[in-house]
Amino acid sequence: MQHDPSRTSYYVGDDFYQSLVDSYTDWQTDESEIIDPALRDTCRMLLEKEARMLDQNRLDDWLSLYVPECLYWVPATPHGGDPRTEIAVCFDDRRRIEDRIYRLKNEFAWSQQPLSRTARLISNVGAFSTEDKNTLMIRSTFLTTEFQAGDKRTYTGWYGHKIGFQDGNWKILVKQVNLIDCDQNLRNLSIIL
Amino acid sequence: MTPDDSFNSSVARPKSTSFDFEQLIFEDRVHQCIYTEEAIFRAEMNKVFGGVWVFLAHESQIPENDDFVTSKLGLRPIIVVRDSTGRIRALYNRCTHRGSTVCRQHQGSAKSFSCPYHGWSYFNSGKISGVPWPDGYADDFSDPKYNLAQVPRVQSYRGFIFGTLNPDMPPLEEYLGGVKKPLDEWLDRHPGGTLSFCDANRLKFNGNWKLLYDNSADGYHVIFSHRSLLAMENRLVEGGEEDKGMSYYKSSPDNAPFYVKVFENGHHYKDKRPAVDTSPGGLWNIEGPHPGMEHYEAMIREKLGDKAGSILDLASSEPVNINVFPNLHILGNHVQVSQPVSLTETDTTWWGTAVIDDKDELHGCVDAVNALRMRTQESFPNFGELDDLMNFEQIQTGLAGVEDEWVYMHRGLGIPDRIKRDTDGYLIGPPTDEVFLRETMQVYKQLMMSEPNLIIEREVDAGLD
């Protein structure tokens, strides 16, 4: 039976978690680093497009960069442990990302009244091959500046994107956001990083 | 010692606060300066955070001998350690020599702590173990004055570790009083009556710590402050399905069958269970959407059949707010701890809790329950608490208008028969009533007018309290 991941969450089970933990363990090796400039540029452009859409608050367009059974993950421990046994800052499957977007569009989400303005810098983009030639991992460094309610603050760290080649396009399977201060108390993290 | 010192100082200190709390706290209102005056904040860090039992850590964070976790008692940096003999202590994280912290990791295992500055070392009992080149001292360091200071009274209640510097505080269990009952009930829904911490959603806000405590049993704000959350959780609900989350607040909660109860010492309790179906599977039915819900529910139902409902309930938020003054809040499955950072900065850490099932009471489903619990617990800090914290920050902003002096908390006051007493004598009111806040403010007022004689301990073998 086909389930709609926007309405139900059947895909987040033991297999999904295990595959997630495996994907994000020891993946940034010298041997797997991709040197092909064209492929690296493709990765960089995808990340820059994603950042642009988020900065422009085009949240539905942003989500269209993701596969249906996707994940947005901000671990609460450096590099992320096993999300089955530890709380994350954010752990959003497709339905919860849509919840998040719904809430951000809701004028009664007080933590986003007025809406934040953001400017994202992405750099040091490196791509890494996996056992599946249609799946790549990307590491990049980010610096996001947020202006909200008279206050300017920054989030920084590195992204670990897992992307897959589907129907002629690279789509995002998982976005892991590794904040350098992920295990510290954070003030009003209500934007999508 | 001067009479207005709130701790046992060997030097005369300026009076901690000259504010007259009789003029600041009334039954129906409090003065804005209790949220905005630096001198009042400094006094609170002794008279409240130090003067009463303050939550420091949970035993599951230090399961083995020699395990430690850092914490704070007010602004004092503390190492909560299970020493090599198994005794739980709260050591001051401050070298006796020149004052540096001796432990700079948040959590770990150590038989001793060594100061990085000049190398003075201490056993994890706090006793000094040695100093480099002792020949340079005309002193053999046998005097306990060189041991690490420690919180003189550290007691646990069912895994929750508290400390106080006040020798005149009653024992912890007496201080907790009536709030033990809901705490017991909350723990007893788990196998073995216990649970473990499993990392946290860590938040902070630019506002005074009391703004959070003021909110903790507030049923009045829910449908306003959490309007976006309620809409979000119910956006996929179809006809015939139950409303999700805190929908029981929606129409006229004062007529709904749930209540707020006020205990002694500033503790209070909002029991929302009477508003929901608590038969097996009832709590699960009103959980909002979370990652993995349908997958694990199908798995557990297939495995356990009729028994699945009560086990799924363990992955659901328990509809209670149990508030232990001044810094511990138990709600849903969270242990929320608030930590003053400064007059206008507060950290609030939402510890997640996991089920422990040594006797397999969950029939092999504990891992599935915990995988669900992690996700259910991430929801409120992400989609609910942030809106509250913004409102707290905006209160702090609003209170800068100092001529506008009063903050009101008189909802329910003066209405005949609205507030009742239960058979134990505790006040009970409708869920949106501010009676909990009024009563807490009276406790706070008495504390701020008191002159506790705070002490530290350095004798490592001093009486087990």
Image (cartoon, coloured by chain):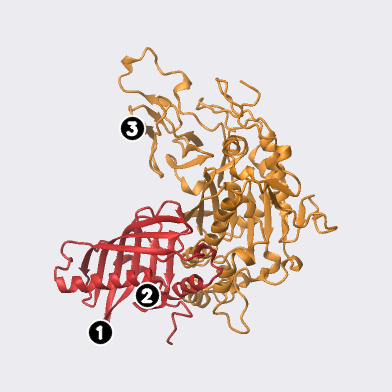
Chain colours: A red, B orange
Q: Residue at x 53, y 67 (%)?
A: A109
Q: Chain of mark 2?
A: A
Q: Nearer the viewer, mark 3 or mark 1?
A: 1
Q: Amino acid at mark 2?
A: Trp
The residue that mark 2 highlights is A62
Q: Earlier in the sequence, mark 2 or mark 1?
A: 2
The kind of secondary structure element at disc 2 is helix
Q: Tell me the residue that label 3 is attached to.
A: B116
Tell me the kind of residue under disc 3.
Answer: Pro
Residue B140 lies, with reference to residue B402, above or below; the image says: above
Q: Are marks 2 and 1 on the same chain?
A: yes
- Mark 2 surroundings within 10 Å by alpha-carbon count, few (fewer than 14), some (14 through 19), many (20 or more): some
Q: Position of residue A155 (x, y in %)?
A: 37, 57
In whole angstroms, how far apart are the C-alphas of marks 2 and 1?
A: 18 Å
In the figure, is residue B444 to the left or right of B372? right
Element class at badge 1: loop
